[in-house]
Image (tube, rainbow, N blue to C red):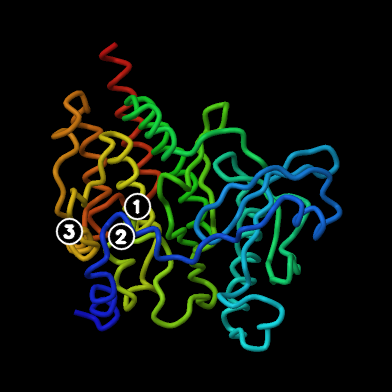
Amino acid sequence: MPTDLMNLKHYVSRVPFGMLEGLRLPAPDLSSKQIKEALPVIEEVGQPARGGQRAVFPIVIGGRRFALMVMPLSQSATVAEAEEASFGEVEEVVSRANREFAILEKCNIPQFVKTGPIRPTECNIGGTRFVCFTEEWIDGTNVEEILAASGPFAISELVRLGEDVATAVKALWSLSIVHRDIKPRNIMKRAKGTYVLLDMGYALDLSDKSLSASGVIPGTLAYFSPEQIDLSRKRQMDFRSDLFSLGIVLYQAATNRHPFWTTGMTTSDVLARTLQGMTEPPSTYRKDLPPSMERVILRLLAPSPHMRFKSCAHLVEALNAVAALGRSIK
């Protein structure tokens, strides 16, 4: 077993699965007033939402609504501690913000948000250093919230979710980019129905240098692909890693259950099941799930990348076939 994988399994061996997303730094706790004072170009600031290591504020500039992303520049980011903060740590946050903004500028399709008027900018808010930038504001709900409110998705909605995220993954891979953090919270449904893939903060550009500190595995452990768990395979990852994470999302959307977790498991248990592809068929929990949809989900969750779909286009074709069969039955 590679050393990096051994270290990861040791690090998380006693962490309960429910804490998987709590291993990141908390998002900044800032008020709307502080944001308005730091960035006078903003006309209005609403109450923030927080996720991962960023706070997201609804704002108005030039009479138009945008989302303002705010991220701390380091773990010890106060101006007074600036000399103590690692240059590499600060550089990584700024580089990730610049990369995310650049990706969104290049991926001009409905499955991504558009960029806003404020490019990645360093600022001092309340004595703390942050990087801020703006994106299109989306009126909609993320997949995690939809599942919590309404339960498992209808088959037609599963197909749409899969097709839209596959389209986003294809666009990223055309730029040699792997998202690395596809999960229900990072997929939002627009009011008009299209699913949008959010948060490029952990995107890996295989044509560029790595931004992660040595030994750090970016992303959300509960949605890692087997190859994402193993740092020795980092530069070998491709779009199929994102397809695996999409498989987890589709399994959850179909059943309202995680494919590799049951109550009482530790994080180490979940990682082991992920590596071995140990999961119950989704039809175990969803009796009306068409066999063709189940085959798509299980193929996405294959532990070896070569057993998954060989392209995003092939995945979309398989999902179209599921939809066509559903229409013929009706």
- Give the mark nearest the N terminus, 3 or 2: 2
Label 2 is placed on what type of residue?
Ser
Mark 3 Cα shell of 10 Å, populated few (<14), some (14-19), many (≥20): some
Q: Which residue is mark 3?
A: 273
Q: How many marks?
A: 3
Secondary structure found at label 3: helix
Q: Which mark is residue 187?
A: none
Q: Which residue is mark 2?
A: 225
- What is the distance, in whole Å, between disc 1 and disc 2 at their CAs? 6 Å
- What is the distance, in whole Å, between disc 3 and disc 1 at their CAs? 14 Å
Percent coordinates x, y for residue 243 in the rendering: 35, 51
- Taking depth in this image into account, of 306 and 158 the one nearest to the observer is 158
Percent coordinates x, y for residue 188 in the rendering: 51, 39
Q: Name the quarter where the N terminus is drawn.
A: bottom left
Secondary structure found at label 1: helix
Label 1 is placed on what type of residue?
Ser
Secondary structure found at label 2: loop
Q: Which residue is mark 1?
A: 245
- What is the distance, in whole Å, between disc 3 and disc 2 at their CAs? 11 Å
Percent coordinates x, y for residue 159 in the rendering: 37, 32
Please say if 255 is above or below 28. Answer: above
Q: Do callouts 1 and 2 mark residues in contact (Cβ within 8 Å)?
A: yes
Q: Nearer the viewer, mark 3 or mark 2?
A: 3
Residue under the point 60% across and 71% down:
93
